[in-house]
Amino acid sequence: MRVGKLKNRNIIRQVLILALCVAFGWYLKSKLTPQVSMPNSGAGGEPYVLIQDVEEQDVSPKTTYIGHVEAIKSVNITPQINGYVEKVLFQEGSQVNEGDLLFVIEQERYIANVELRQAELASAKANLVRAERDFKRQSSLSKQNYASKATLDTSESTYLQAKAAVAQAQANLDLAKIDLGYTEIKAPISGRIGKALVTEGNYVSSSSQTLARIVQTDPIRVAFSVTDKDMLNMRQRYDGKASQIKTELVLSNGTVLVNNLRSRFADNEVNSDTATIAVYAEYNNPKDLLIPGNYVDIRIGEKASQKAILVPQAALAQDEHGSYVMTINDEGIVMQKRVTLGDIIGDKQVALDGLNFGDKVIVQGLQKVRDGQKVRAELVKDDEEV
């Protein structure tokens, strides 16, 4: 019996200790938890609420695809001759125009080679003049039976060889001039040039590495893939009405580019592995916001916009009669308005009826107000947290 009493006493003691711990915990919580001070309700006890403006936005249906930005033209600058780089004449990362001089490879020996070929050509022409005169003389003598047939044939052969030598010398001179022209490397296209991969003083050859790379940035191309079903739907819907299509590009920082489209075309076959077809859209890019290699969202829809009233979902309430919102007028008086709702778009919903553009709806504090009551309201923007 004594053991049982001791056991009961231990249980009672543990319960008391637990109760004291819980009470002490609640005491600490009340002391340590910061008290949230609500805005002053003002004289007269007017409730404090947050409101937002009802917006009118374009709710035209759009389909979004992931696009890859790529240059329409790109060129790797490579040398066509051997020699040391004498000059690098561009600023790395700058915009260059077609025909701008970029590199100069040592020109002295190529100039000397041109002069040598010019001398060879002059010599060949002099030999041609002598051979032609001899051939004409032998032809005249042969007609008068003063020269043998063998002598005439020899002079004719010499004359033809001299003509061929002139043609060969001319070709050698042309090749030497071409090589001299290759000592000046010019931009074949307009675009943005990257880093100089070879600097002054380095020896390069026609089989060496790339000197620099140019990519065209304006216009630029965005490539994306659509399903074969989407492609058929678009062709049937916009057949002969391509001007009705509106495209928007959404950059990685949220910037939206509209109406920069120049042209577009689709690939000539469907990828059987993915059941998609590649589409290429060409865009104006005057500010270089589209960078080759980047990914963007491309939204496709109709140019004709469909405007609708959008109300924040935080402002919506419902009772047995349907959906409603609480609005306030310029005097701060609350008015209940019944609404007919449509599609949900993000954190908003289309109000088909019951609201007008510019109405102010309560988004926080609905439970504290009633129809006809005067309140104190603060306007918050759409991107502010409520």
Image (cartoon, grey):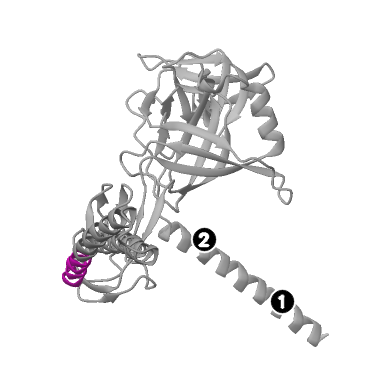
Q: On the image, numbered disc 1 is attached to which residue?
A: 11
Stretch in magenta? 107-120
The local crowd at label 2, few if under 14, some if 14 to 19, many if 20 or more residues have their Cα within 10 Å, is few
Residue 383 seen from this side: no
**Which amino acid type is shown beneath numbered disc 2?**
Trp
Query: Can residue 118 be found in the magenta stretch?
Result: yes
Q: Residue at x 44, y 31 (%)?
A: 262
**Which amino acid type is shown beneath numbered disc 1?**
Ile
Q: Residue at x 53, y 29 (%)?
A: 367
The local crowd at label 1, few if under 14, some if 14 to 19, many if 20 or more residues have their Cα within 10 Å, is few
Q: Residue at x 26, y 64 (%)?
A: 176
Residue 26 shows which numbered tag? 2
At which x and y percent is residue 117? Answer: 22, 66
Q: Nearer the viewer, residue 239 or 304?
A: 239
Q: Quadrant of the C terminus?
A: top left
The answer to whether residue 64 is left or right of residue 215 is right
The answer to whether residue 209 is left or right of residue 117 is right
The answer to whether residue 311 is left or right of residue 124 is right
Labels 1 and 2 touching (C-beta < 8 A): no
Majority secondary structure of the magenta segment?
A: helix
At which x and y percent is residue 133? Answer: 23, 57
